[in-house]
Image (spheres, rainbow, N blue to C red):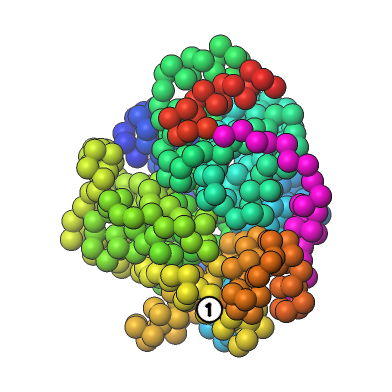
Amino acid sequence: MPFFSTRGSDAVTASQAILRGIAPDGGLYVPGEFPQMTLDEIAALQQMSYRERAVSILSRYLDDFTSEEITASVAGAYADGKFDDPAVAPVKKLDDNTFVLELFHGPTMAFKDMALQLLPYLTGLSAKKNGEEREVSILVATSGDTGKAALEGFGDVPGTSCTVFYPLDGVSPVQQLQMTTTAGKNTHVIAVHGNFDDAQTGVKKLFASGEFADAMNSRGKVLSSANSINFGRLVPQVVYYFSAYADLLAAGAITLGDKVSFVVPTGNFGDILAGYYAMQMGLPVAKLICASNRNKVLTDFFATGEYSVQREFYKTDSPSMDILVSSNLERLLYEVSGRDAECVRTWMEELKTQGCYDIGAENLYTLLQTFAAGTADDEETRAEIKRCLTENGYLMDPHTAVASKVLRDYRAENEDDTVTVVLSTANPYKFAMPVLAAVAGDEALQGLDAFAASDVLERTAGVPVPAQVKALPTLPVLHTAQCDKEDMGKAVLAAFDNK
């Protein structure tokens, strides 16, 4: 299957798309077509393990990988013991028509593990297939979870290195320690003086810089990405939409062919875009509901058709969604425009030069046949955390709670009781302080750091603190580098030259 850039550059293979990460013209790689799944094939997933489901879905896109390569990669990524639930991505029931898809059972307790445990295998194979003998240097901007998941996935993998940029003071204490205590001879973690959008923009500039590419090449390195701009990050996420549907079938919650809705807390739009890809493949989807926090650029986009970053940036209880430039939206725009690369290029240039673009009423109408959107601020999010614990006995992290509140608002407004799956993207103990404040009030935080708050939350909510969180305060901090957003390239080169 050929892969094309959203901005029109020549077609490449799946392995080339994964190895490059981003197209030379700055666009994102998309599949030439969406492989189809029949209802009978979807029904057959019920009898499969998560690994078998992953092989079935991935094989339809990665056609220059052999079946044996995909099977071995999936076996390594989701090996017994890597995820603390044998289902890998279990579905839990909240009420008769609301379910939670738990995506946080991997080694870093966030949904990014679902893809970043697999990507190193795909990257290594892609390098071999394309005769790439240089070190594949992974460059990542993170709003909190991608960074540690990438470091965990690529740490000490032969032939690779991994450099992560995160916004200083823009992630939770647990997220920051997860990254800065990372071992591995091939890992680098650098704090950027700015927000996530600054870090993400800086990484994109480095990918587009011939001078930086030459500097890396002189060191025997070639750039690739582990952000969701890389198709190798996106395609594993398609799997868990099909897996959730199969689990609902197996539980008798739906019958084959019933449409299911999904509500997704999202900032960079990759997680919900994977649901759109699943729908295009034939998964019966009623609505994809985009949930935002106070940084509601996506909510406003789906309300008006205008995407504008000319707005105030807020730091919230759900920092992984504190994003104004949602990179993966470009892939959706490519589809809604009829795969018009020139149109996408124009919109992206307007975003770069004017800070906004407008897709027009007709394109917006098309999107709203599939998508809905809503927002929840920190006060509403904390109230939802407490409500879910009180009414359902279920403890949510702030990102998941944003989605849960948006779903309740959507149902109230639309009188829609379709069976809906809430994607739960992180373990609540990655954000123990706002979760404890939600459950026990702000006064419960007095004198506590994130780890003391975890202990109190465990006693209050009756949910055990994960071993990974308990261990963090005892680990040495190995990464202390910082840089201004204008100096990210220099910081990368210095990290390599000094190690």
Give the vertical position of 230 relative to 497 (above or below).
below
- Which residue sits at x=58%, y=62%? 425
33 vs 119, left or right, is left
Question: Relative to the observer, which residue lies in front, 142 or 22?
Answer: 142
Q: Residue furthest top?
A: 218
Residue 476 colored magenta? Answer: yes
Mark 1 lies on a secondary structure that is helix
Question: Relative to the observer, which residue lies in front, 467 or 338?
Answer: 467
Res. 290 image quadrant: bottom left
- Which residue sits at x=68%, y=36%? 479
Give the vertical position of 487 relative to 384 (above or below).
above
Amino acid type of disc 1?
Glu
Q: Residues within 10 Å of mark 1 (few under 14, many from 20)?
A: many
Relative image position of residue 241 (x, y in whole percent): 55, 62
Relative image position of residue 122 (x, y in whole percent): 62, 37
473 vs 301, left or right, is right
Res. 232 image quadrant: top right
Q: Which residue is label 1 attached to?
A: 384
Q: Is residue 103 visible?
A: no
- Which residue sits at x=42%, y=45%? 197
Relative image position of residue 467 (x, y in whole percent): 80, 59
Q: Residue furthest front?
A: 447
Q: Which residues are magenta?
A: 463-482
Relative image position of residue 103 (x, y in whole percent): 63, 61
In which quadrant is the C terminus drawn? top right
Q: Is residue 399 visible?
A: yes
Question: Relative to the observer, which residue lies in front, 251 or 342?
Answer: 342
Give the vertical position of 303 relative to 256 (above or below).
above
Residue 111 colored magenta? Answer: no
Question: Relative to the observer, which residue lies in front, 296 or 2?
Answer: 296
